[in-house]
Image (cartoon, rainbow, N blue to C red):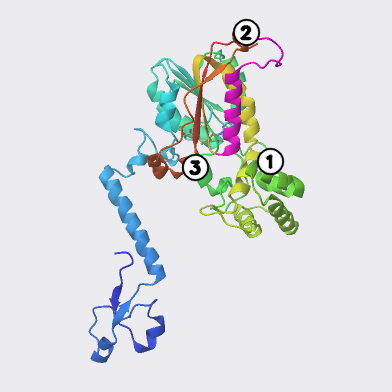
């Protein structure tokens, strides 16, 4: 139906508005002969076309949902017992993660980034009664969701806080060197992105916060208010790979002189004005928001500090998995895994035996990306890349 012309009659006086207005008499009204001769095809107004397209999409989604046999489309029905809050985040590369972990039923696994527990639930389902999962998240809302969802799950320990406390925590639990699998699913979750109150997204207006743990560190608004122009430019360039970093930094400093930049919308709008070009399908503030988020949460530093702890925590044969969503994160993971797989480095002129090199990790397979079907179901997955490595027998010094 969408876009089909509608037969309407038009009054002579309304000729100019013919494309945007319907006859108040309606298509089936009996009209005087002279008006009938003037009857002609009139296209629906643009607003009407948009409404029709929306209705058609809704009806299509409802049909798909009915075919799937439930309230939720098939892609959202992940595990029995899932609540709406849990399904607000679809785990990325779930099957691939579970396969790569290759857990035994009595395995010990660390979920470094619980989020809404999609990976965690899959792991628990693979473990037997003697298995254990230790899940970290520094977002109090994620921790509350975990505790509510798995209140009766004795095999799961939820640890509130940054994953950089992994080494210390596992040591205290007597689990250092005994873990069979560790998963990092980096970045932010859909509930964090979709809640305007968290300030992560330029699509919604909200307070410019961006902290995963709102109780620690400084929020984005405060940093933007206190950082120098050079510092802002450097962060946008290095962490956001933003080529217009200097222009944006100048615009921020000019704008904040009047009043502190407190909201996501104000920042998004001023960045959009400062960026002279447009990338297809990408908001001009995307890189700026990413850079500030990485900075406020010290995301790269956290990852850098924790990867060596993860290697120490693994038992021989244990698997380390990392899902990254942007190039800086992935580069860091890739370099770390390669270095660990290369083993100890000696000066080029020192003769070395093979057994002295002691690589602590072995790379497993090639990097894995989501297939088309997953990206269609979950567009957030499109930039995901999963890397897997296995702990060798080599001991730490
Ligand atoms: C992409 S989501 C994980 C989604 C999860 N795998 C799932 O299936 O629901 C990332 C989560 O990791 C948390 N996170 C990110 N960096 C963290 C860090 N350094 N320490 C602890 N949690 C972190 C975020 O708060 C967020 O909840």
Q: CA distance from mark 2 to mark 3?
A: 52 Å
SS assignment at label 2? loop
Q: Does label 3 or label 1 sit earlier along the sequence?
A: 3
Label 3 packing within 10 angstroms: few (<14), some (14-19), many (20+): some
177 or 102: nearer the viewer: 102
Viewer-closest of 152 and 318: 318
Name which quarter of the figure residue 44 lies in: bottom left
Which residue is labeled 2 in the image?
Answer: 353
Q: What residue sits 38% from the left and 24% below the top?
A: 125
For the C terminus, which image quadrant? top right
Question: Is the residue marked by circle 1 packed among few (<14), some (14-19), or many (20+) residues within 10 Å?
Answer: some
- Of label 2 and label 3, which has the lower sequence position? 3
Mark 1, residue position: 218
Task: Look at the numbered disc 3 and give the secondary structure of its residue.
Answer: helix
Q: Real-space Cα distance between discs 3 and 1?
A: 21 Å
Ligand 1 closer than 8 Å to label 1 CB: no
Tell me the magenta residue range.
326-352
| Residue 191: image tag | 3
Do the CB atoms of the residues marked 2 and 1 lie less than 8 Å apart?
Answer: no
Kindly identify the residue that appears in the image at 62 percent across and 35 percent down: 299
């Amino acid at each position: 139906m969408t876009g089909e012309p509608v037969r309407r009659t038009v009054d002579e006086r309304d000729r100019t508005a013919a494309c945007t207005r319907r006859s108040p008499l309606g298509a089936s009204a009996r009209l005087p002969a002279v008006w009938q001769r003037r009857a002609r095809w009139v296209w629906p107004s643009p607003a009407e076309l948009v409404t029709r397209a929306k209705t058609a999409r809704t009806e299509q989604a409802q049909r798909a949902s009915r075919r799937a046999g439930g309230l939720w489309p098939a892609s959202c029905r992940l595990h029995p017992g899932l609540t709406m809050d849990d399904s607000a985040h679809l785990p990325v590369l779930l099957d691939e993660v579970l396969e790569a972990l290759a857990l035994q039923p009595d395995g010990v696994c660390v979920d470094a980034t619980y989020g809404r527990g999609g990976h965690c639930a899959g792991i628990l389902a693979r473990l037997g009664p003697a298995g254990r999962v230790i899940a970290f998240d520094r977002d109090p809302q994620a921790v509350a969701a975990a505790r509510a969802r798995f209140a009766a799950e004795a095999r799961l320990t939820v640890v509130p806080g940054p994953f950089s406390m992994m080494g210390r925590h596992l040591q205290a639990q007597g689990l250092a060197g005994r873990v069979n699998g560790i998963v990092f699913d980096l970045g932010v979750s859909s509930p964090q992105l979709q809640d305007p109150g968290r300030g992560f997204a330029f699509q919604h207006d909200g307070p410019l916060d961006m902290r995963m743990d709102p109780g620690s560190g400084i929020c984005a608004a405060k940093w933007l208010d206190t950082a120098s122009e050079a510092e802002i430019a450097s962060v946008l360039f290095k962490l956001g790979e933003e080529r217009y970093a200097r222009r944006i930094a100048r615009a921020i400093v000019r704008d904040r002189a009047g009043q502190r930049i407190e909201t996501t919308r104000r920042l998004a709008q001023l960045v959009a004005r400062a960026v002279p070009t447009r990338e297809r399908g990408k908001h001009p503030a995307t890189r700026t928001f990413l850079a500030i988020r990485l900075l406020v949460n010290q995301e790269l530093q956290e990852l850098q500090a924790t990867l060596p702890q993860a290697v120490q925590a693994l038992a021989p044969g244990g698997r380390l998995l990392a899902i990254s969503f942007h190039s800086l994160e992935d580069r860091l993971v890739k370099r770390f895994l390669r270095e660990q797989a290369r083993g100890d480095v000696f000066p080029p002129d020192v003769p070395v035996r093979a057994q002295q090199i002691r690589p602590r990790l072995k790379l497993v397979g090639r990097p894995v990306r989501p297939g088309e079907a997953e990206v269609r179901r979950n567009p957030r997955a499109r930039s995901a890349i999963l890397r897997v490595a296995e702990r060798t027998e080599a001991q730490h010094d």
